[in-house]
Image (spheres, rainbow, N blue to C red):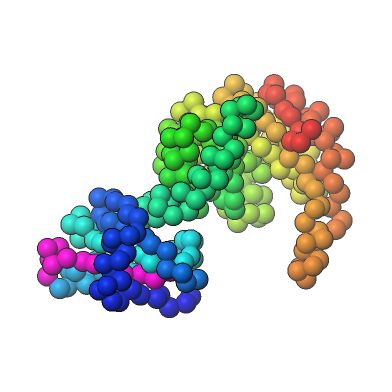
């Protein structure tokens, strides 16, 4: 990772304080201002009011480390000043990091995204739609995503989220409280098989889904089906029973058939790819026939 560039001169600090935008949390104040560079620069201010030198240096080191570890996910080209507040002294590292990301989200990328989303507000009002947060995985940037959903909600725009369900329960609970619709992937019901394909079991995923159902969240279950991988008779029977056991607790389920649009891209990147997998569309009738016996409304995505 590149070395952190720093703001050093007093006149630079004064300019950023005077002309930059600011955001506040209980632990710190963040000032940002464009710097006409391709990278961000950091300045940290820790007042003597926070304690003796050892205490101040500890706070300073933690703030610098939080910036260093998260700067790749920030919009570039800004000078940033972090001003520690009294509560930063006794805060846990995760509390400081969460506060930093939340404030940055509201100051930087969130504002830029909201400005783009609002341009289509008339379309959303006429179509009944809204903003969809996808990825990657939104749950990997929980505070920024929550800040974004909250910001567009203030503009009268609804939100949906595509997720694999692997985030924290607190993240999903906060998103639900903001009226988010969840497009929730169930890739495989069998936990060992799910772990073989994705690296994680289903325990946390199913737990988050259950929690959202208990809260009465708006949920569409989506099932990415890949011929020869997760569409065996046993897989489909488990999936059917999974849906049946939760009938009435979510809106509907959608089959997402495998497509091979990424084969050409993988070839151009020199990556190995399995070209023998048939298109999922050829199997939709079979999948629908089995899954529809769950008593749940099942659709095919894109049809």
User: Residue 4: where, in percent of width, then height?
Assistant: 40, 75
Please name the residue shown 85% across and 58% down the image: 275
User: Residue 186: where, in percent of width, then height?
Assistant: 64, 40
Q: Which of the 4 quarters of the picture holds residue 288?
A: top right
Answer yes or no: is residue 92 visible: no
How many marks do you count on the picture?
A: 0
Q: Is residue 217 left or right of residue 220?
A: left
Please name the residue shown 30% across and 66% down the image: 15
166 in magenta: no
Q: Is residue 16 left or right of residue 113?
A: left
Residue 97 vs residue 79, the one in the foreground: 79
In the rendered image, the quadrant that contains the C terminus is top right
Residue 213 vs residue 202, the one in the foreground: 213
Q: Is residue 261 left or right of residue 147?
A: right
- Which residues, given as a range, are shown in magenta? 39-52
User: Residue 20: where, in percent of width, then height?
Assistant: 34, 59
Please name the residue shown 12% across and 70% down the image: 52
User: Residue 236: where, in percent of width, then height?
Assistant: 74, 36
Answer yes or no: is residue 180 visible: yes
Q: Is residue 129 above or below residue 224?
A: above
Q: Is residue 216 above or below residue 13?
A: above
């Amino acid at each position: 990772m590149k070395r952190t560039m720093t703001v050093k001169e007093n006149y630079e600090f004064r300019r950023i304080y005077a002309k930059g935008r600011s955001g506040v949390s209980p632990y710190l104040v963040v000032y940002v201002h464009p710097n006409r560079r391709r990278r961000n620069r950091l300045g940290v201010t820790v007042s003597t009011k926070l304690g003796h030198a050892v205490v101040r240096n500890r706070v300073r080191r933690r703030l610098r480390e939080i910036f260093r570890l998260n700067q790749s996910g920030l919009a570039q080209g800004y000078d940033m000043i972090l001003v520690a507040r009294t509560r930063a002294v006794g805060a846990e590292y995760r509390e400081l990091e969460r506060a930093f990301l939340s404030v940055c989200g509201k100051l930087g990328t969130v504002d830029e995204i909201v400005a783009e989303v609002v341009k289509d507000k008339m379309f959303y009002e006429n179509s009944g739609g809204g903003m969809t947060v996808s990825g990657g995985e939104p749950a990997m940037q929980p505070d920024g995503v929550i800040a974004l959903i909250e910001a567009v909600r203030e503009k009268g725009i609804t939100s949906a989220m595509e997720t694999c369900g692997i985030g924290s329960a607190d993240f999903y609970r906060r998103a639900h409280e903001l009226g988010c619709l969840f497009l929730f992937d169930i890739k495989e019901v069998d936990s060992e098989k799910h772990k073989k394909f994705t690296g994680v079991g289903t325990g946390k995923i199913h737990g988050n889904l259950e929690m959202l159902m208990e809260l009465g969240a708006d949920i569409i279950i989506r099932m990415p089906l890949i011929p020869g991988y997760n569409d065996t008779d046993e897989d489909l029977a488990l999936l059917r029973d999974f849906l049946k056991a939760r009938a009435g607790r979510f809106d509907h389920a959608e089959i997402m058939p495998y497509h091979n649009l990424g084969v050409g891209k993988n070839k151009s990147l020199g990556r190995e790819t399995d070209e023998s997998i048939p298109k999922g569309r050829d199997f939709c009738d079979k999948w629908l026939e089995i899954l529809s016996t769950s008593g749940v409304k099942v659709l095919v995505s894109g049809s």
